[in-house]
Image (cartoon, rainbow, N blue to C red):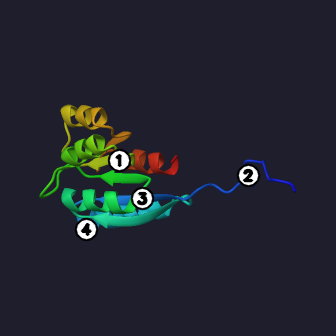
Amino acid sequence: MSQEVDGDCCSVKEKSVLIVDDSEFMRTVISDAVRQCPRLRVAGEAGDGDEALELIRKLCPDVVTLDLRMPRMQGLAVLRALKDEGLNSHVIVLSGLMDAADREESLRCGAKGVFEKTEEFEEFRRALAQL
């Protein structure tokens, strides 16, 4: 019995992505960016932090894109809850109106990347493509 070992021949596991943003428009934009990455698939979408936590617990996504400013529960509270509960999704923050303290706190709470929506969207897309 032979086994393929060449990196080009081996299948790469598809990663599931949960998109969390209170803007339906931004969820669509992020979904389009995810769909352009062949190894990623959209597992679901959430419009606020409470819904995000519920879906993360239910779906166990590999990756979560997370807005910081949302109704009901802010993104930093979601990050803290994920850390406290030991949930291991790879979180990438994509938010608007961030300051240095938001960036630092996001990384301290476990985010793997932090990007500003309007200024760093292309960097966000490149980070997705590298997952």
Q: Amino acid at mark 3?
A: Val
Q: CA distance from mark 3 to mark 4?
A: 16 Å
| Tag 3–tag 4 contact (CB < 8 Å) | no
Q: Which residue is mark 3?
A: 17
Residue at horizontal 31%, vertical 46%? 93
Q: Please state if 2 lies on the left or on the right of 120 as rendered.
A: right
Q: Please state if 40 lies on the left or on the right of 100 as rendered.
A: right
Q: Position of residue 95 (x, y in %)?
A: 25, 49
Q: Amino acid at mark 1?
A: Leu
Q: Earlier in the sequence, mark 4 or mark 1?
A: 4
**Given this view, does label 4 or label 1 mark the residue nearer the observer?**
1
Q: Which residue is mark 1?
A: 87
Q: Callout 1: few (<14), some (14-19), or many (20+) C-alpha neighbours within 10 Å?
A: some
In the picture as drawn, the residue positioned furthest to the left comes out as: 72
Residue at horizontal 26%, vertical 38%? 106
**Given this view, does label 4 or label 2 mark the residue nearer the observer?**
2
Q: Earlier in the sequence, mark 1 or mark 2?
A: 2
Q: Which residue is mark 2?
A: 8
Q: Amino acid at mark 2?
A: Asp
**Given this view, does label 1 or label 3 mark the residue nearer the observer?**
1
Q: Earlier in the sequence, mark 1 or mark 3?
A: 3
Residue at horizontal 12%, vertical 58%? 72
Q: CA distance from mark 4 to mark 1?
A: 25 Å
Q: Position of residue 108 (x, y in %)?
A: 28, 32
Residue 24 — which label? 4
The quarter of the image holding the N terminus is bottom right
Q: CA distance from mark 3 to mark 2?
A: 24 Å
Q: Earlier in the sequence, mark 4 or mark 2?
A: 2
Q: CA distance from mark 1 to mark 3?
A: 14 Å
**Could you tell me which secondary element the residue under label 2 belongs to?**
loop
Q: Quadrant of residue 51?
A: bottom left
